[in-house]
Image (tube, rainbow, N blue to C red):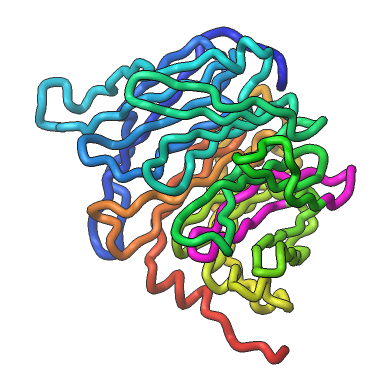
Amino acid sequence: VNQRQTGLGLIQIMEVACKGDPAKVLDISVAYLIRHNGAVTWDLAWCPAASTQGTGVLAAGLGDGQVCLYCVPGRDPEAEGGTKPLNLKPRLQTSELQKRKSIPSSLAWHPAAPHNTLLVGCWDGNVALFKLSLDRIDLVFFVRADTFPLRKVCWIHERWNSGDKCEMYATAGLSGSLKIWSTNEPQALRYSHTMSYSTNIMDVKLVGHNGGLVFLSSDGRLLYLYSTTNGFKIGFRSVTKNCFSCAALDRDYFVFSTITGEVLVANLRRMCSEKGLPRTLGELPDLCLFSLSMDAKSEALKLDDTVSEQRFTELEVYPAQQVHVYKNAIMPEAPGLENAVGIAHATGSGILRIQLLDRKKLERALKVKKVKQ
Protein backbone atom coordinates (compact mmCIF):
# COMPACT_ATOMS: atom_id res chain seq x y z
CA VAL A 1 0.00 0.00 0.00
CA ASN A 2 2.94 2.37 0.50
CA GLN A 3 4.15 1.96 -3.06
CA ARG A 4 3.53 4.69 -5.57
CA GLN A 5 1.00 3.61 -8.16
CA THR A 6 0.31 5.26 -11.49
CA GLY A 7 -2.30 4.58 -14.10
CA LEU A 8 -5.83 5.53 -14.98
CA GLY A 9 -8.15 6.05 -12.04
CA LEU A 10 -11.74 7.20 -11.78
CA ILE A 11 -13.84 8.91 -9.11
CA GLN A 12 -17.61 8.91 -9.67
CA ILE A 13 -19.99 11.25 -7.85
CA MET A 14 -23.53 9.89 -7.91
CA GLU A 15 -26.79 11.82 -7.90
CA VAL A 16 -29.74 10.17 -6.16
CA ALA A 17 -33.28 11.43 -6.78
CA CYS A 18 -35.77 10.68 -3.98
CA LYS A 19 -39.44 11.47 -3.53
CA GLY A 20 -42.52 10.43 -1.59
CA ASP A 21 -43.56 9.58 1.96
CA PRO A 22 -42.19 7.09 2.70
CA ALA A 23 -39.32 8.19 0.48
CA LYS A 24 -38.34 6.05 -2.49
CA VAL A 25 -35.35 6.19 -4.83
CA LEU A 26 -36.53 7.40 -8.22
CA ASP A 27 -33.23 7.48 -10.06
CA ILE A 28 -29.47 7.04 -9.55
CA SER A 29 -27.10 8.58 -12.07
CA VAL A 30 -23.45 9.57 -12.42
CA ALA A 31 -23.34 13.36 -12.03
CA TYR A 32 -19.56 13.99 -12.09
CA LEU A 33 -16.48 12.13 -13.27
CA ILE A 34 -12.95 12.74 -12.02
CA ARG A 35 -10.23 11.07 -14.06
CA HIS A 36 -6.72 10.92 -12.59
CA ASN A 37 -3.40 9.11 -13.06
CA GLY A 38 -3.04 7.88 -9.47
CA ALA A 39 -4.45 4.40 -10.24
CA VAL A 40 -6.25 4.11 -6.88
CA THR A 41 -8.11 6.59 -4.70
CA TRP A 42 -7.20 5.77 -1.10
CA ASP A 43 -9.58 8.20 0.54
CA LEU A 44 -12.15 10.92 -0.18
CA ALA A 45 -13.39 13.63 2.19
CA TRP A 46 -16.00 16.32 1.70
CA CYS A 47 -15.31 19.70 3.29
CA PRO A 48 -17.83 20.15 6.17
CA ALA A 49 -18.46 23.78 5.20
CA ALA A 50 -21.89 24.34 3.65
CA SER A 51 -21.57 25.33 0.01
CA THR A 52 -23.61 28.29 -1.26
CA GLN A 53 -22.61 28.02 -4.91
CA GLY A 54 -22.40 24.31 -5.62
CA THR A 55 -22.26 20.80 -4.23
CA GLY A 56 -19.07 21.33 -2.20
CA VAL A 57 -15.31 20.82 -2.07
CA LEU A 58 -13.92 17.27 -2.28
CA ALA A 59 -10.43 16.21 -1.18
CA ALA A 60 -8.86 13.07 -2.67
CA GLY A 61 -5.76 11.10 -1.65
CA LEU A 62 -4.37 9.29 -4.70
CA GLY A 63 -2.12 6.30 -5.20
CA ASP A 64 0.66 8.35 -6.78
CA GLY A 65 1.07 10.40 -3.59
CA GLN A 66 -0.88 13.46 -4.66
CA VAL A 67 -3.58 15.19 -2.62
CA CYS A 68 -6.10 17.03 -4.80
CA LEU A 69 -9.01 19.37 -4.14
CA TYR A 70 -12.02 19.52 -6.46
CA CYS A 71 -14.71 22.20 -6.50
CA VAL A 72 -17.92 20.36 -7.35
CA PRO A 73 -20.48 22.75 -8.86
CA GLY A 74 -24.24 22.51 -8.77
CA ARG A 75 -26.15 20.95 -11.66
CA ASP A 76 -28.99 22.32 -13.72
CA PRO A 77 -30.75 19.34 -15.36
CA GLU A 78 -32.65 21.68 -17.68
CA ALA A 79 -29.48 23.20 -19.13
CA GLU A 80 -27.97 21.82 -22.34
CA GLY A 81 -26.22 18.55 -21.52
CA GLY A 82 -27.50 18.86 -17.95
CA THR A 83 -28.10 15.12 -17.60
CA LYS A 84 -24.65 14.09 -18.83
CA PRO A 85 -21.79 13.52 -16.35
CA LEU A 86 -19.53 16.53 -15.96
CA ASN A 87 -15.77 16.05 -16.02
CA LEU A 88 -13.91 17.80 -13.19
CA LYS A 89 -10.29 18.91 -12.95
CA PRO A 90 -8.43 19.57 -9.68
CA ARG A 91 -8.76 23.11 -8.37
CA LEU A 92 -5.63 22.64 -6.23
CA GLN A 93 -3.15 19.81 -5.83
CA THR A 94 0.07 19.15 -3.97
CA SER A 95 2.96 16.72 -4.49
CA GLU A 96 4.57 17.32 -1.07
CA LEU A 97 3.87 13.75 0.05
CA GLN A 98 5.06 12.40 -3.28
CA LYS A 99 8.39 14.21 -2.80
CA ARG A 100 8.76 12.52 0.59
CA LYS A 101 7.86 9.09 -0.86
CA SER A 102 4.69 8.87 1.23
CA ILE A 103 1.26 7.77 0.04
CA PRO A 104 -1.90 9.23 1.64
CA SER A 105 -4.21 6.78 3.38
CA SER A 106 -6.67 9.01 5.24
CA LEU A 107 -7.95 12.60 5.01
CA ALA A 108 -9.65 14.76 7.65
CA TRP A 109 -10.90 18.33 7.26
CA HIS A 110 -10.73 20.53 10.34
CA PRO A 111 -14.27 20.34 11.80
CA ALA A 112 -14.36 24.00 12.91
CA ALA A 113 -14.84 26.97 10.58
CA PRO A 114 -13.24 28.14 8.35
CA HIS A 115 -12.19 24.53 7.61
CA ASN A 116 -8.93 25.67 6.03
CA THR A 117 -6.66 22.87 7.27
CA LEU A 118 -6.48 19.29 6.04
CA LEU A 119 -4.94 16.46 8.05
CA VAL A 120 -3.46 13.59 6.04
CA GLY A 121 -2.34 10.20 7.34
CA CYS A 122 0.04 8.04 5.29
CA TRP A 123 0.63 4.35 4.71
CA ASP A 124 4.21 4.65 6.03
CA GLY A 125 3.05 5.96 9.44
CA ASN A 126 3.67 9.65 8.77
CA VAL A 127 1.11 12.40 9.22
CA ALA A 128 0.97 15.77 7.44
CA LEU A 129 -0.97 18.97 8.00
CA PHE A 130 -1.81 21.27 5.08
CA LYS A 131 -2.98 24.87 5.20
CA LEU A 132 -5.45 25.70 2.44
CA SER A 133 -6.21 28.98 0.69
CA LEU A 134 -7.98 29.96 -2.52
CA ASP A 135 -4.92 29.47 -4.71
CA ARG A 136 -2.45 27.24 -2.87
CA ILE A 137 -1.81 24.35 -0.49
CA ASP A 138 1.01 24.82 2.02
CA LEU A 139 2.58 22.06 4.10
CA VAL A 140 2.60 23.02 7.80
CA PHE A 141 4.32 19.93 9.19
CA PHE A 142 5.22 16.35 8.26
CA VAL A 143 6.07 14.05 11.19
CA ARG A 144 6.30 10.40 12.10
CA ALA A 145 3.26 9.21 14.09
CA ASP A 146 3.69 5.43 13.95
CA THR A 147 6.01 2.73 12.70
CA PHE A 148 3.05 0.93 11.10
CA PRO A 149 0.64 2.11 8.40
CA LEU A 150 -2.05 4.58 9.45
CA ARG A 151 -5.60 3.62 8.56
CA LYS A 152 -7.21 6.72 9.97
CA VAL A 153 -6.55 10.25 11.15
CA CYS A 154 -9.25 12.21 12.95
CA TRP A 155 -9.60 15.54 14.74
CA ILE A 156 -10.58 15.47 18.40
CA HIS A 157 -12.08 18.16 20.60
CA GLU A 158 -10.36 19.19 23.79
CA ARG A 159 -13.36 19.41 26.11
CA TRP A 160 -11.77 21.89 28.48
CA ASN A 161 -11.12 24.38 25.67
CA SER A 162 -13.75 27.06 25.20
CA GLY A 163 -15.75 27.40 22.03
CA ASP A 164 -15.09 25.20 19.01
CA LYS A 165 -11.31 25.30 19.22
CA CYS A 166 -9.96 22.01 17.95
CA GLU A 167 -6.19 21.62 17.92
CA MET A 168 -5.81 17.94 18.80
CA TYR A 169 -6.00 14.96 16.48
CA ALA A 170 -5.85 11.17 16.62
CA THR A 171 -3.92 8.64 14.55
CA ALA A 172 -4.68 4.92 14.40
CA GLY A 173 -3.90 1.90 12.28
CA LEU A 174 -2.14 -1.42 11.96
CA SER A 175 -0.12 -1.04 15.17
CA GLY A 176 -3.29 -1.36 17.24
CA SER A 177 -2.53 1.99 18.89
CA LEU A 178 -4.72 5.06 19.09
CA LYS A 179 -2.56 8.14 19.67
CA ILE A 180 -3.54 11.72 20.47
CA TRP A 181 -1.37 14.61 19.25
CA SER A 182 -1.48 18.41 19.23
CA THR A 183 -0.91 20.63 16.22
CA ASN A 184 0.89 23.10 18.49
CA GLU A 185 3.52 20.47 19.34
CA PRO A 186 3.36 17.98 16.44
CA GLN A 187 5.86 15.51 17.90
CA ALA A 188 4.62 15.63 21.51
CA LEU A 189 2.43 12.58 22.23
CA ARG A 190 -0.49 13.54 24.50
CA TYR A 191 -2.14 10.15 24.95
CA SER A 192 -1.76 6.59 23.70
CA HIS A 193 -3.88 3.47 24.02
CA THR A 194 -2.64 0.16 22.60
CA MET A 195 -5.02 -2.78 22.45
CA SER A 196 -2.60 -5.46 21.27
CA TYR A 197 -0.03 -5.80 18.54
CA SER A 198 -2.18 -8.42 16.82
CA THR A 199 -5.21 -6.10 16.69
CA ASN A 200 -5.69 -3.39 14.09
CA ILE A 201 -7.80 -0.26 14.42
CA MET A 202 -9.96 -0.22 11.32
CA ASP A 203 -11.73 3.13 11.57
CA VAL A 204 -12.11 6.19 13.83
CA LYS A 205 -14.93 8.74 13.90
CA LEU A 206 -15.41 12.02 15.78
CA VAL A 207 -18.72 12.27 17.63
CA GLY A 208 -19.82 15.85 17.11
CA HIS A 209 -22.33 16.27 19.93
CA ASN A 210 -19.87 15.56 22.74
CA GLY A 211 -16.39 15.55 21.19
CA GLY A 212 -15.63 11.86 21.80
CA LEU A 213 -14.07 9.32 19.45
CA VAL A 214 -15.54 5.99 18.38
CA PHE A 215 -13.09 3.49 16.94
CA LEU A 216 -13.52 -0.02 15.58
CA SER A 217 -11.07 -2.85 16.04
CA SER A 218 -10.30 -5.92 13.96
CA ASP A 219 -11.36 -8.20 16.84
CA GLY A 220 -14.94 -6.93 16.80
CA ARG A 221 -14.71 -4.43 19.63
CA LEU A 222 -16.25 -0.98 19.58
CA LEU A 223 -14.29 1.52 21.67
CA TYR A 224 -15.24 4.99 22.85
CA LEU A 225 -12.69 7.60 23.92
CA TYR A 226 -13.87 10.80 25.58
CA SER A 227 -12.15 13.54 27.52
CA THR A 228 -12.96 14.90 30.95
CA THR A 229 -11.43 17.53 33.20
CA ASN A 230 -9.35 14.69 34.64
CA GLY A 231 -8.02 13.53 31.29
CA PHE A 232 -9.06 10.93 28.72
CA LYS A 233 -11.26 7.95 29.55
CA ILE A 234 -11.94 4.92 27.41
CA GLY A 235 -14.56 2.19 27.36
CA PHE A 236 -15.23 -0.72 25.04
CA ARG A 237 -17.69 -3.49 24.28
CA SER A 238 -17.35 -6.65 22.22
CA VAL A 239 -20.04 -6.32 19.57
CA THR A 240 -19.22 -9.06 17.07
CA LYS A 241 -16.83 -11.94 16.51
CA ASN A 242 -16.05 -10.61 13.04
CA CYS A 243 -13.58 -7.96 11.96
CA PHE A 244 -14.99 -4.46 11.57
CA SER A 245 -14.26 -2.71 8.28
CA CYS A 246 -15.59 0.87 8.35
CA ALA A 247 -18.07 3.27 9.88
CA ALA A 248 -20.13 6.36 9.07
CA LEU A 249 -22.07 8.73 11.27
CA ASP A 250 -24.17 11.86 11.27
CA ARG A 251 -25.76 13.75 14.15
CA ASP A 252 -28.28 10.96 14.89
CA TYR A 253 -27.03 7.59 13.66
CA PHE A 254 -23.90 5.46 13.66
CA VAL A 255 -23.51 2.90 10.85
CA PHE A 256 -20.79 0.26 10.99
CA SER A 257 -19.95 -2.81 8.93
CA THR A 258 -17.90 -5.99 9.05
CA ILE A 259 -15.82 -7.91 6.54
CA THR A 260 -18.50 -10.61 6.53
CA GLY A 261 -20.82 -8.27 4.63
CA GLU A 262 -23.07 -7.02 7.42
CA VAL A 263 -24.05 -3.37 7.90
CA LEU A 264 -25.62 -2.33 11.21
CA VAL A 265 -27.01 0.90 12.60
CA ALA A 266 -27.29 2.30 16.15
CA ASN A 267 -28.62 5.48 17.70
CA LEU A 268 -25.54 7.66 18.10
CA ARG A 269 -26.69 9.78 21.02
CA ARG A 270 -27.83 6.79 23.06
CA MET A 271 -24.67 4.88 22.25
CA CYS A 272 -22.14 7.64 22.99
CA SER A 273 -23.17 9.55 26.08
CA GLU A 274 -20.92 11.66 28.27
CA LYS A 275 -20.79 8.71 30.68
CA GLY A 276 -19.17 6.51 28.08
CA LEU A 277 -20.48 3.37 26.42
CA PRO A 278 -23.48 1.58 27.97
CA ARG A 279 -22.54 -1.09 30.48
CA THR A 280 -24.63 -3.81 28.88
CA LEU A 281 -25.02 -4.85 25.29
CA GLY A 282 -28.75 -4.59 25.81
CA GLU A 283 -28.29 -0.83 25.83
CA LEU A 284 -26.32 -0.85 22.60
CA PRO A 285 -29.10 -1.37 20.08
CA ASP A 286 -28.32 -2.25 16.53
CA LEU A 287 -30.33 -3.14 13.49
CA CYS A 288 -29.01 -5.09 10.54
CA LEU A 289 -29.59 -3.07 7.37
CA PHE A 290 -27.76 -5.08 4.79
CA SER A 291 -26.18 -8.51 4.46
CA LEU A 292 -24.15 -9.78 1.51
CA SER A 293 -22.98 -13.38 1.53
CA MET A 294 -21.70 -16.00 -0.89
CA ASP A 295 -23.30 -19.39 -1.39
CA ALA A 296 -20.65 -22.04 -0.76
CA LYS A 297 -21.95 -24.37 -3.50
CA SER A 298 -22.91 -22.05 -6.34
CA GLU A 299 -20.45 -19.25 -5.43
CA ALA A 300 -23.24 -16.81 -6.18
CA LEU A 301 -23.56 -13.62 -4.16
CA LYS A 302 -26.74 -13.45 -2.08
CA LEU A 303 -28.23 -10.20 -0.88
CA ASP A 304 -30.18 -10.38 2.41
CA ASP A 305 -30.92 -14.07 1.69
CA THR A 306 -33.55 -13.02 -0.84
CA VAL A 307 -31.81 -11.82 -4.00
CA SER A 308 -29.26 -13.99 -5.78
CA GLU A 309 -26.84 -12.08 -8.01
CA GLN A 310 -25.59 -14.85 -10.31
CA ARG A 311 -23.78 -12.50 -12.68
CA PHE A 312 -21.22 -11.59 -10.06
CA THR A 313 -19.78 -15.13 -10.05
CA GLU A 314 -17.74 -14.16 -13.11
CA LEU A 315 -15.70 -11.62 -11.18
CA GLU A 316 -12.15 -12.74 -10.49
CA VAL A 317 -12.07 -11.77 -6.82
CA TYR A 318 -11.82 -13.70 -3.58
CA PRO A 319 -14.98 -14.46 -1.59
CA ALA A 320 -13.86 -12.20 1.27
CA GLN A 321 -13.43 -9.35 -1.19
CA GLN A 322 -16.83 -10.02 -2.71
CA VAL A 323 -18.80 -9.58 0.51
CA HIS A 324 -16.50 -7.06 2.20
CA VAL A 325 -18.26 -3.71 2.76
CA TYR A 326 -15.43 -1.24 2.17
CA LYS A 327 -17.28 2.02 2.74
CA ASN A 328 -20.51 3.29 4.28
CA ALA A 329 -21.95 6.76 3.85
CA ILE A 330 -24.97 8.54 5.29
CA MET A 331 -26.59 10.81 2.75
CA PRO A 332 -26.92 14.49 3.72
CA GLU A 333 -30.31 16.05 4.29
CA ALA A 334 -31.87 17.08 0.99
CA PRO A 335 -35.27 17.59 -0.66
CA GLY A 336 -37.09 14.25 -0.69
CA LEU A 337 -35.28 13.00 2.44
CA GLU A 338 -37.16 15.01 5.08
CA ASN A 339 -38.59 11.89 6.72
CA ALA A 340 -35.95 9.36 5.73
CA VAL A 341 -32.32 8.41 6.34
CA GLY A 342 -30.32 7.54 3.22
CA ILE A 343 -27.42 5.11 3.60
CA ALA A 344 -25.03 3.88 0.88
CA HIS A 345 -22.87 0.75 1.06
CA ALA A 346 -19.99 -0.03 -1.32
CA THR A 347 -18.71 -3.62 -1.48
CA GLY A 348 -15.67 -5.32 -2.93
CA SER A 349 -17.81 -7.01 -5.59
CA GLY A 350 -18.59 -3.65 -7.17
CA ILE A 351 -22.10 -3.43 -5.74
CA LEU A 352 -23.25 0.03 -4.63
CA ARG A 353 -26.45 -0.23 -2.63
CA ILE A 354 -28.54 2.71 -1.45
CA GLN A 355 -31.19 2.27 1.23
CA LEU A 356 -33.81 4.76 2.41
CA LEU A 357 -35.03 4.17 5.96
CA ASP A 358 -38.15 5.77 7.38
CA ARG A 359 -37.03 7.81 10.40
CA LYS A 360 -40.05 6.96 12.55
CA LYS A 361 -39.84 3.24 11.85
CA LEU A 362 -36.08 3.30 12.40
CA GLU A 363 -36.49 4.98 15.79
CA ARG A 364 -39.12 2.44 16.81
CA ALA A 365 -36.78 -0.38 15.80
CA LEU A 366 -33.95 1.17 17.82
CA LYS A 367 -36.06 2.00 20.85
CA VAL A 368 -34.15 1.26 24.03
CA LYS A 369 -35.64 -0.19 27.18
CA LYS A 370 -34.09 0.96 30.41
CA VAL A 371 -31.83 -1.69 31.84
CA LYS A 372 -31.14 -1.78 35.53
CA GLN A 373 -27.47 -1.08 36.23
User: Is residue 203 toward the left or the right of residue 67 in the image?
Assistant: right
Q: Is residue 178 above or below residue 88?
A: below
Q: Residue 68: give x, y in percent of width and height.
A: 46, 21
Residue 141 can be seen in this image: yes
Residue in view at x 80 percent, y 57 percent? 241
Residue drawn at (70%, 38%) of the image: 298
Q: How many numbered markers are drawn?
A: 0
Q: Is residue 199 magenta?
A: yes
- Residue 249 at what x, y percent from top left? 51, 55
Residue 33, position as x, y percentages in the image: 36, 21
Viewed as shown, does residue 232 lie left or right of 130? right
Q: Which residues are magenta?
A: 194-216
Tell me residue 82's x, y (percent).
17, 26
Quadrant hosting residue 310:
top right
Nearer to us in this view, 189 or 248: 189
Residue 293 visible in the picture: no
| Extreme residue in the right direction | 197
State the residue in front, 90 or 19. Answer: 90
Quadrant showing the N terminus: top right
Q: Quick check: is 233 in the magenta stretch?
A: no
